[in-house]
Image (cartoon, rainbow, N blue to C red):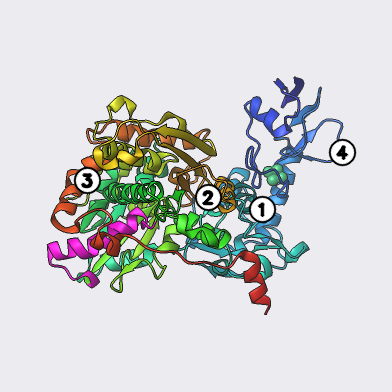
Amino acid sequence: MLHLTINGKAVEVPEGSTIMEAAEAAGVKVPSLCHMKNVHQYGSCRICVVEVEGMKNLQASCMVKAREGMKVKTHSPKVLAARKVLYELLLSNHPKDCLSCNRNQSCELQELGYELGVTESRFEGAMSKSRVDISPSITRDTSKCILCRRCVTACAQIQKVGAIQAQNRGFDTVISPAMGLPLNSTACAMCGQCTVVCPTGALQETDGLTPVWKALADPGKRVIVQVAPAVRAALGEEFGLPCGTPVTGKMATALHEIGFDDVFDTLFSADLTILEEGTELLSRLNAALTGGQATLPMITSCSPGWIKHVEHQFPGELDHLSTCKSPHTMMGAVVKTFYAEKTGTKPEDMFVVSVMPCTAKKYEIQRPEMEVDKIRDVDAVLTTRELARMIKKCGIDFVNLPEGEFDAPLGLGTGAADIFGVTGGVMEAALRTVYEVVTGTELPFEQLHVTPIVGLEQVKTASITIENTLPAYEHLKGVTVNIAVTSGLEGASMLMKEVADGTSPYHFIEVMGCPGGCINGGGQPRCTEENYREKRAKALYSEDERKVLRKSHENPDLMKLYGEWLGEPNGHLAHHLLHTHYVERGKYNQLVENEKK
Ligand code: FES
């Protein structure tokens, strides 16, 4: 242990700690802009400078290691004066459009200015070249970039995609894809993890609100909204509620108050996904065991960022992906066919909005495959952050809203669907249904959680031996099914390398594109609280546990949909509406080569 004093207060920290960590141990918060605890130490902004006795120059506390006997001042007049100058220099090369910037009041740069008492910059000089790149999911505005490189770390180190890097040098430095390519023509997965860590408005979700407001104002449109499971675990954070507070009922009330005509729950179509995907898995296993053609392992397809990543990086392995569309696009297809017929509404007069924790879903709805008979499944995707903005704009007192309900017939979901939002959840939901279908035996409540795949580890695995079966599944008796679960594109790529090599021991793999699953999606509120992912995951498990219906095939409204209209899972109509195919995309290097040509 090392002993030092921070602002005169004695503190003890483990060897290897930085001065910033020592300050934290002393209860002092040193301001920072580029630093991300345990994730990104780059030392580019210098806002965290402190005075160390015996050292002539101020030191960047996030980079410099604490030493025995150090005496540190974190907020001395010299430090505060230096921080102010550093801040003003940053400001001298930053647009002054805070009032119209989407990050207004949620911008780390703006907050820091307030904290430092800076009201203007004394410096005027050249401005960096501005470039606005609007991709379907992410909008980049280089004029707002402070070159902290958090986004580069999120993309290259956490997701292992590497779609953006620092290009050029000195004053011309810009964070961009190689050769200044637009994001949409690179191997970017559109996961939006870069938008979560960006401290300013340089990286944001692409606007989904404008078309939604327009549709709501159009009396000729029936505007239908649906909400993904993970949104309810995080939306409350935008209104000051503690991280991990489930706000399902308040959210349903708010959506009605905003003026949506129908408020449906993506939980319904998550249950639908389980019926479709579980049936597909059983068909593939059946075929493999009876000498037929089957591609195993089968891999889940709910996460569009993950799908885009496979299409770029493993284009030869697309047959491993389940053909199921993602739950919200399934909902869109059902709304514009079944519900349109039921309500006598023309599908072209319907406008379906999905509220998602995800930025990649904005890109997904624009894929040509996501339509039925030339009608788009979903018309707009809003992130959780955008829904919060909408609620605030309508002046709704969210915290004090009464608990509301989703609308019938597409608003009912089981507990199995709630856990779709967390890594391991889709697999667990699928196993709850597949087990009962194959064995004909009820799975007791206390055995619903598949413990080895619960938790936030990067890769989780389990093996399940099928002991008893119904006669129709006799050939599965004694078979051991190996499963794997991963979240984040680094873990997914590790598992895919085995698949591509032909060495994968698994039969079924669940992949979610963001670390921890959708609870940590690129469209979720920016949260710096300790263990925020665990808290959001707990919120979804608590939603599951409070329900009476906890298995997808127990959803009575879903079974009615099959009985009255859809027919069998994986049947002809189900295939037409709810399944899709994938396309081989060029690898990043090939794209760069093509661009050169
Ligand atoms: Fe230390 Fe940016 S926070 S240099």
Q: Answer with mark 3 or mark 4, whichever residue precedes in sequence.
A: 4
Q: Are marks 1 and 4 in contact (CB under 8 Å)?
A: no
Q: Residue 554: where, in percent of width, then height?
A: 21, 40
| In this rendering, position of residue 465 left or right of residue 314 | left
Q: Secondary structure at mark 2?
A: helix
To which residue does mark 2 refer? 196
**Tag 3: amino acid:** Leu
Q: Is residue 557 visible?
A: yes
Cα separation between marks 1 and 3: 43 Å
Q: Nearer the viewer, residue 321 or 145?
A: 321
Q: Answer with mark 1 or mark 4, whichever residue precedes in sequence.
A: 4
To which residue does mark 1 refer? 149
Which mark lies nearer to you, 1 or 3? Answer: 3
* The residue carrying mark 1 has its beta carbon less than 8 Å from ligand 1: no
| In this rendering, position of residue 115 left or right of residue 53 | left
Q: Answer with mark 1 or mark 3, whichever residue precedes in sequence.
A: 1
Q: Quadrant of ligand 1?
A: top right
What span is colored magenta in the figure? 323-348
Q: Are marks 2 and 3 in contact (CB under 8 Å)?
A: no
Cα separation between marks 2 and 4: 37 Å
To which residue does mark 4 refer? 56
Find the residue positioned furthest to the front: 291
**Tag 1: amino acid:** Arg
- Residue 25 picture quarter: top right
Which mark lies nearer to you, 1 or 4? Answer: 1
**Tag 2: amino acid:** Val
Q: Is residue 102 visible?
A: no
As for residue 328 lying within the magenta part, the answer is: yes
As for residue 560 lying within the magenta part, the answer is: no
